Amino acid sequence: GNSVTQMEGPVTLSEEAFLTINCTYTATGYPSLFWYVQYPGEGLQLLLKATKADDKGSNKGFEATYRKETTSFHLEKGSVQVSDSAVYFCALGSGNTPLVFGKGTRLSVIA
Amino acid sequence: EAQVTQNPRYLITVTGKKLTVTCSQNMNHEYMSWYRQDPGLGLRQIYYSMNVEVTDKGDVPEGYKVSRKEKRNFPLILESPSPNQTSLYFCASRGQVRTEAFFGQGTRLTVV
C-alpha cells in the first residue's frame, strides 16, 4: 500500500539556518505530494504541493521538488525564523482514498 | 470563507458514555475523512467517505462509527468510549482526487 516516511525529529535550529526535512514515499501510480504544517494548538494547514514529477511546490520561503526517480519530496528553506517552529507533515494522495501522512517532524527554531 | 468546522474543540468524558463529534464543510467536497493524532504515531485514518451514504474503514476503525447522510456533514460517533481513545481528532475534506485536504481545528478528547 501507499506509505510516507519522513525524518524523525525533533529538529532544533538557530534562526537563519538552512532547513531540510527528508520525505520519501511508496505508492502505486502517480500520486500527488503535499507538505502540511501544524502550529501549536492548531489544525493542519497546507504548506505546499506538487502533482507530478519534477514539479516544485513553494510557499513562504519553503520549497520541495517531486522527484520520481528517488521517490522523494524533501522540504527545504534557506533561512528559518522563530515563527517557523511547528510540526511538519509530508503526505501523499493517490486515487480516491484519504491522504496518507508521515509521522511528522517537530521543528524548533531558537533566536 | 471555505472551512471545515468541528465541534466540540475540547471534550472530557467518562468511559462508556456515548459521544458524537460533529464535522461540517462548506465547500461541497465529495471526500471526507477522520484522523486521530497521537504522539509518535502521526496521523492515522479512522474512517473516510467518498460520497453520501458511502463510507469505508481506515487503518484504526475499531471503536468508532461514522455516517454520511448529507454531503456537508460527517459525524464521528464513539458508542462506548475507552481511555485508549483519548487523542486529538481531525476531520478533513477534499474536493477531487489528487487535490489537497482541508482540515478542521481538531477535537481534543479525554476519556477517563
Image (tube, coloured by chain):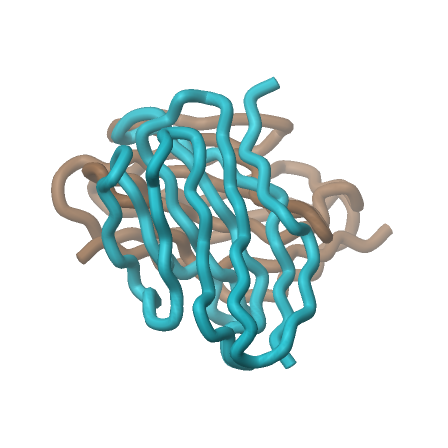
The one nearer the camera, B111 or B16, is B16
Q: Residue at x 51, y 79 (%)?
A: B82
B1 vs A1: above or below: above
Left or right placement of residue B17 versus residue A80 in this view:
left
**Residue A104: x, y in percent?**
51, 58
Q: Which chain is cyan?
A: B
Q: Residue at x 63, y 78 (%)?
A: B14
Q: Quadrant of residue B99?
A: top left
A2 vs A82: above or below: below
Q: Residue at x 56, y 50 (%)?
A: A88
A7 vs A97: above or below: below
Left or right placement of residue A105 versus residue A98 in this view:
right
Point out the residue furthest to the left here. A29
**Residue B56: x, y in percent?**
24, 52
Q: Which chain is brown?
A: A
A59 vs B19: above or below: above
**Residue A53: x, y in percent?**
25, 30
Left or right placement of residue A56 versus residue B90 in this view:
left
- Residue B39 visible from this viewpoint: no
**Residue A106: x, y in percent?**
62, 59
Q: Quadrant of residue A108?
A: bottom right
The one nearer the camera, A86 or B101, is B101
The one nearer the camera, A79 or B69, is B69
